[in-house]
Each structure stands twice: as structure tokens, then as C-alpha cells.
Image (spheres, rainbow, N blue to C red):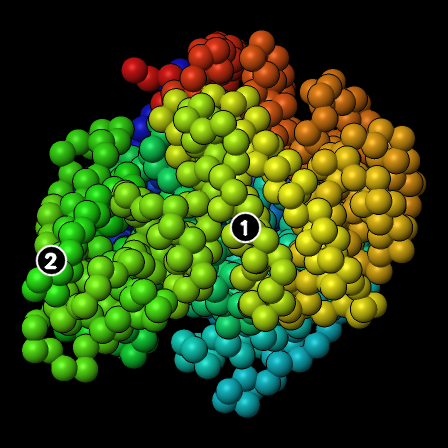
Amino acid sequence: MRTSQPRTIYLSEYRVPAFLVDHVDLRFELFENGARVHSTLTVRRNPEYPGVAEHLELDGDSLKLESVSLDGIELGADRYQDQGDKLVVQAVPDKFGLNVVTWIEPQNNTRLEGLYKSSGMFCTQCEAEGFRCITFFPDRPDVMARFRTRVEADREKYPVLLSNGNDVDRGELADGRHFVTWEDPFPKPCYLFALVAGDLVLKQDTFTTCSGRDIDLRIYVEARNAAKCDHAMDSLKRSMRWDEEVYGREYDLDIFMIVAVDDFNMGAMENKGLNIFNSSCVLASPETAADTAFQRIEAIVAHEYFHNWSGNRVTCRDWFQLSLKEGFTVFRDAGFSADMGSPTVKRIEDATLMRTAQFAEDAGPMSHPVRPSSYMEISNFYTLTIYEKGAEVVRMIHTLLGPELFRKGSDLYFERHDGQAVTTDDFVKAMEDASGRDLGQFRLWYEQAGTPLLTVRDDFDSEAGIYRLTIEQAIPDSPGQTSKNPQHIPFALGLLGADGTDLPLRLFADENDAPSERVLELTAARHEFEFHGLSERPVPSLVRGFSAPVRVDYPWTREQLIFLMNHDGDGFNRWDAGQRLAVDVIQALIRGDEEGVDERLVEAYRSLLSDPSLDQALVAKMLQLPSEAYLVELADSADAQAIHGARTRVLDCLAQALRGELLECYRRNGDDGSYQLTPEAIAARSLRNTALSWLLHIGDREACGLAQTQFQDAGNMTDRMGALRALVNSCFVTEREAALNDFYQCWQDDPQVVEQWFSVQAASLQAGTLNHIRELLAHPAFDWKNPNKVRSVIGVFAGQNLAQFHQADGSGYIFLAEQVCRLDDSNPQIAARLVSPLTRWRKFAEPYGGKMKQALASVRDKEGLSKDVFEIVHKSLKE
Ligand code: TRP
Ligand code: ZN
């Protein structure tokens, strides 16, 4: 716990390490009351270090030091200093072996960093700085070493003992104990170290690589989860094939292991050869997991697997470079998911996440560049900006270079930097060198925070047949950054003629074979483009496919939006036009500019619902009204209840007007009994559940019966949960209580399902939800030590339930502040993530904003606040 203000770390302070570690020999003695860690480091001075370092400094955190030996001789207390967070060994030679023995208490580790216990098994999480909770070590990613790890534990309790690489030795020990030794041939930073010891069952498969090597694929889970591994295993094999085909990347070890653990701070971790997953991100069966979970599992398995190259073989020089591995790997997993399903739907999902959550982050107090230049606590920088905006930046390079040159660039990057710890600049340089393109100005995407705003205006000269487009870019100020320079923005454009087809985009009067889509490259604060040879004023289709993470201001008329919804050749922009239309209608209601819901929106939705010849996967997305979170993001000063009220009115109106179409859509998309994960099957389930929820929203009796039947008879969790969600948010009190009880009775032994049961209640629109949330916290299945449970109740309530969280009396905020303070003592990483809804206080109108700020101040005033929460709260309250 902190006693003084935490220190800020700056990128400008980066120095190469004074000492390098070539080899790490670890021996873990695991017991019920603690663990003894013997570490032997082979250390030498770094020839590239400027100056001379007399002392060796190692990082540590919460360690009990037992002994220090240098070249086999135990050092007296006068030769080293144990400063708690550092071990300083004085006057060391140029090359030496250092042995350090520490004692740690995994059984009491509630922070879930370093070595800890989860449902009886030992496991680790070392990224970003967790290895220092295991032993003293230069805990920085540019120190790369070969690891050899011997794990010793009781044979009965912990029959499975795992670490990175290959198992090279095993045997029996006294007192019913045994050991296994693992050796990882690839040098790696310590954040990629992993260890698991437990009573686990093994699901096994093989994969033959492109060069014909057979890889042993292993998924280790608790016995009760043995039947829930198939989807992850299939996803893994598809990922391995895809990375060979699309990036030319072959797997490098002989074994690839995944372990599922219930208690985990994040989604999953790419430890070399031994990925550790949050159970909820790996385990699935059709009966227990919904479509969204299946898709998330496929994406996360791929993400972690792809890190083997983008992250492990080529890693980060320092944590300011985090997006080097995360942004690139998210870009890679997005490409994989697009190829496995519907590319348009995947793009819609990613753009939605960017525009609702990342834009909000980038406009808030924690706004930071894709490559930050300072931080207090690195765990706070595993953000949407680093991951999602970072991926968008890589995607823009892909757009600017085209697929062939991009692949040449990635090949060069992997070849040039294999085995190295590098920077985002090295990545861009490889792309430049392979393509011959100058990405000098493009680098600003890594350095400048904030979402660029593009103001687009047009006019049509009917005499000359010239359509003129002017585009201005402005990047808002953000903490520590003002007067930003224009960025290099790929702007994909189409122009639609009256018949709905794309017109040729002639930049010169006599240009032949002009393409019907162009990627304009914006580099200046203002550009003017002229398109020639047009006989009519076109409707512009702007930033097709969300070609850049920007906001667009263009004065669309509702007619234009409806036209684009029906005709745009770019599926993404058809969806986008529908969203803009719905936003426009909802905002007019909020302002009081319009009395009722524009009939044209109703008719647009009617055609979507009743034309089965349309791409149903796209239709399923187009039917989703813009979320409340997105409407908040678009507002200058958000009135939470007004936003909720207006959106609810639109939903009411649509459901009333389209009752017949919704029932018909429900019937047309009935369950055929098979469970498939094709875009078509997923779309059908989404459509029937959307129809159901809309009808229950208006209290339709017939639909209530349909929901009850679907709830009882569903053959999969998507439909069962769809029915439950619709009932929970309906006015049918008895029916919803019965369904909730029934569901819990049936699934109480499955933690992943209980988490969904908590979430659906935490997201409930019913009045009195806050009281109910307090009851859920007292429920026997709730567990403060389990991040998934905390997220499924408190996280969902504060992050996804706008109307219930934003009570005008501030009770939702006070509740959240209390829970954050409580969690801060046991798990600061989780507390810091949970507090984030309050940090948006400036975005909200009164009385909301002021009361959010008060709640935040009460967290600031808590005694012994962790560094994690300290950083977020102080930055959010700063003037
Ligand atoms: N590198 C992990 C990923 O993106 C992220 C991660 C997992 C993580 N667990 C963590 C980051 C704990 C910080 C702390 O795949
Ligand atoms: Zn990652």
C-alpha cells in the first residue's frame, strides 16, 4: 500500500539495462502455507550501457528474502540491501551467478498478480510487473533470458505441474511430493513466465504445421469442465492455420498449452507455450454459452496464439510500447475473426466499440496516445486506446500500403526483429522500408491523443458537372497536449448516383476508368477535392468501412441517410446510415424539437424486418438501436434520464407500429434444433431474440407466452438467455421471477452461467435495481475475490445500466464508490477498472456530473489508496 504520492514514469527516462540476464534457473517448492522460490540468474554487464553501474538492482514486491549468494557464496547483509521494492547487490563483478531465495504466500495473494491460487490450483500472472512478486529480478521486457523451471509439489493435490517450453525431467520426491522440470529454449522477458500446478484434466489434439511438424495441443481444465473445451481447441487449430496462411507464421515449440482458471484479472495471457485463460474466455458448450461468448472465445484464443509472434518472438522494449504487441495482435485477431465469419459484422462490432468506448476514453481525463509518454501504474494502460485504437492505426497502415506491401512489411518486421525487444517506431520503420512509403507524418497517430474530427462540406456545380468536397481536420486538446498537428488519414469515399449505384470518381475531367471507390489521403488541416463529369448531385458515402478512427461531421438529411441505408455499396456504411438516422431521431426527441417519432424511421425498420432477401447478418445489426452509451458519447452534456427516456420512446414506438412484422420475424427465424455458428445461424438467433425483446418491451401478452416457451424449450444458451433477458426487462413480474429462479436452480453449479445470471439482473431496466444489486452482493454465489463475479454485478450495473446507475439522487455513484474502496484493499487492478464510469463526470449534465465528482472525491480520500486507483482518481479530478 502507498504511503506517499506514487512516482510518474517517463518514456524520456528510458535507459538500456545495466545488466543482462542470459539464463534463469528457478525452483519452486509449493506448499499450502506458502512457496519457496530459488532463483539462480546468470548475469553479465550490458556492453551497451552508457557509464558504469557498480550495483545490481533487482525489482521486488511483497517478497520475504531468505538468502542471497554470489557465485555460490552466501552474501552477508553488508553486501546487499533489501529495500522492499528493490534488492541492491553491491559491487558485483562483470559476470556472475546470483542465487536468491524468497518466500511468498500465494494462498493470501488476492491481487492476482505473481503466483496465486485459484480454486485450489497454483497459477501465475506476470504481465505487466507481476514477476517481481515471485522473486527479485530485473522486471522489464528488454531483459530477455532462457528459463529453466523446476516445480515441486504434493503429488495427490497437484498431479499436473506446468511451466513454459518442454518438460525435460520429472520424478518422485520424499513425503509424497513430485517434481517436473521445464525448459524454454526461447529467450523471453519475465512477463511471459508462467507456472501452473493443480489437479487438472487434459484435452489433447494435434496440429501439423506447414513444414510438417506435429504440435501437441493441450487444454488443461478442472474435471467438471472437461466437456467445454471443443470450441477453444477448434479455434486454436483454425488460428494456427490462419497465421501460417495469412502471415506466414509457423508455431515454434513442440507443445502448446492452454489452462483455464476461474480467478483472473483480465481475459487471457500469452505466456510462452503456456497460455493462461480466464475460464469465461475459453470454456463453452451450446447449452451454457451464448453466441457472443463463442465468438469472444474464438477471438481471444486467436489473439493469445498470435502473440507468439507479435509479442513473444518480437516483444516490447518498454511498457510505453505496449501497443506494439497489443495493437498489432488485435489487428491480427480482427482479420482472423472477419475471415471466420462476416467481415461486415465484425467491422460493425469493432467500430461500435471504438466510437462508444474508445472515443469516450480519448475525450476523457485518462486520454493518452497509442504510445503514451508517461504513466504511474502500467496496469492502468491496458486500455481501449492501446488495444483498439492501436489496432486501427495498424489497419490504416494496411489500407495505405495495400495487402501485399503490408505483408512484405510484416515479414520484414518479424525477420529483422526476431528475438528482440523493440518499439512501435521499429514497426513503422519496417513497414516503410518494405513499401518505400514515407510514414513520417503517419507516426503522429502514435504520439498525439484525441479523436480527429473531420468536418466535411460539399457543393455541386451542375453547369460544370463538378462535385466539390472540402474536408477539414481538427484534433481536440487532451491532458498535456494542445495545438496538435494534422494527421495522415486514409479517407475511403464513394459517391452514389440517384439510381443507387457508385459513380466513377474522376479527379480530372478526362480521367478514364476512374474507380468507384477511392481512399483519399488527408494530410493537411484542409483539403478540397473535385470530382468531374457528374450529371447529378451525388450522395456521399464517407469513411467507408470506418477507414480511420475519426468522427465525421456532415449535414446529412434524413432522406440521404435512408437512401444510403438502402443503397450504399459498402455494408458498413449502410449500417452506419441507419445508426445516424436513429441518433438524429432520438436527439430531436431529447431536445424537444420533435413531438413524435419520425415515421420514416418506422418505415425504414419495417423494410429491414420484412425483406428476407437482405443479408440477415447485416439486418440483425441494423435493427439494434444506438446504445445509450453511444448517445451519451455524442452528447455535449448528457442528461442520462432524458437519453434513456427518448431511446425508450423510440423503441416503444417501433415495437407498437411493427408488432405484426416482429411476430412474423420471430416465426420466420424459428429454431431448427441444430446449433451452428455460421453468420446466418447467429443472425437468425439474434433476430428472433430482438423481436422477442421488443415485443416484451411493450408488454405484449402473446410474446410473453412465446418467451416462456422459448425459455423452457431452448436447446442453447443464446435462446434461453434471450428469453430470460426479455422477461427480466418486461413488466411481467411473476413470469420473470419464475424464470430467474428456475434458471438459478438449474445452473447454480456452473460459475460461467451464474455470471450470466448475475449480469442479466445487473442490467435490468426495472426500478429498484440498485436495491436488488445489493441483494445480489449478499447472494451465496457472489464472491468478492472473484473478478468475474465482481464484473458481472458491479461492472455491469455501473457500466451498462445507464438509467439505473444514473439516479438523480446520486445513490448509484455512492454505491459504486463504496465498492471501489472495498475492492481496492484486495485487488487494486479490478478496483481501478471499476471506478472508470465515475471518471466521466464532466460529460454529464447536472445533477449527475456534480454527484459523480463527489463520489470520486470520496474514493480519493480513502486511506491507503493503491497506486492503481490513485492515478485514475487524481487524473480525473484534476482541473
Ligand atoms: N497480454 C494480455 C493480452 O492482451 C493482457 C493481460 C492479461 C494482462 N492479464 C493481464 C495485462 C494482467 C495486465 C495485467 O492478451
Ligand atoms: Zn494481447
Residue drawn at x 29%, y 58% is 539
Figure label count: 2
Left or right of 798 in this view: 259: right
Q: Vertical placement of 861 versus 373: above or below? A: above
Residue drawn at x 41%, y 76% is 247
Q: Position of residue 251 (x, y in %)?
A: 51, 76
Q: Position of residue 396 (x, y in %)?
A: 29, 61
C-alpha separation, residue under disc 2 versus residue under disc 1: 33 Å
Circle number at residue 603: 1
Toward which corner of the image does residue 540 lie, by quadrant? bottom left
Residue drawn at x 55%, y 46% is 602
Amino acid under label 1? Glu
Q: Secondary structure at mark 2?
A: strand
Pointer 2 residue Cβ closer than 8 Å to ligand 2: no
Circle number at residue 858: none
Q: Position of residue 102 (x, y in %)?
A: 57, 39
Amino acid under label 2? Asp
> Where the C terminus falls, by quadrant?
top left
